[in-house]
Image (cartoon, rainbow, N blue to C red):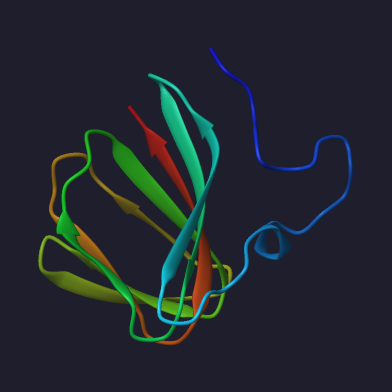
Amino acid sequence: MSGMKNIPKNERMTLASQIDYQPGQVVSKTLAQNNAVSLTLFSFEKGEEISTHVSGGDAMVQVLEGTGRFTVDGDPHILHEGESIVMPAGIPHAVFGEERFKMLLTVIF
């Protein structure tokens, strides 16, 4: 099993400060990935999206900053800073930047 990467260790931080926005883009930063779990930071510019797809594991999102729209099995959910949602494995979902926002995605396989 591999450990954490691309993030400071043994120091105080805020997760939102560990990824920057890029104009017109969705930016991702992998923190951990193995056969059991994937941990990734994302930043979305307003209007940017990840189109409908499915995941092989349960995916939990924690919004760190801003507001995003998460459409799970056709049902839209608007989430703000501090809110979370679980997108079940095998269920279609999409993510859209209602405004620029940052999130932490944890997928358990």
Residue 83: percent from left, percent from top: 50, 67
Side (left or right) of 60 relative to 76: right
Above or below for 13 versus 39: below
Most distant residue in the right direction: 11
Which of the two residues, 96 or 25, is positioned nearer the viewer here? Answer: 25
Q: What is the x, y in percent for residue 19?
A: 63, 61
Image quadrant occupied by the C terminus: top left
User: Residue 28: x and y, percent?
Assistant: 48, 55
- Depth check: 37 or 48 in front? 48
Is 16 or 24 nearer to us in this picture?
24
Quick check: 84 left or right of 64? left
The quadrant holding residue 81 is bottom right
Q: Residue at x 45, y 80 (%)?
A: 45
- Between 26 and 106, the one lying in front of the other is 26
The x, y position of residue 86, in whole percent, is 34, 51
The residue drawn where x is 44% and y is 22% is 34
What's the residue at 66%, 41% (across, down)? 6
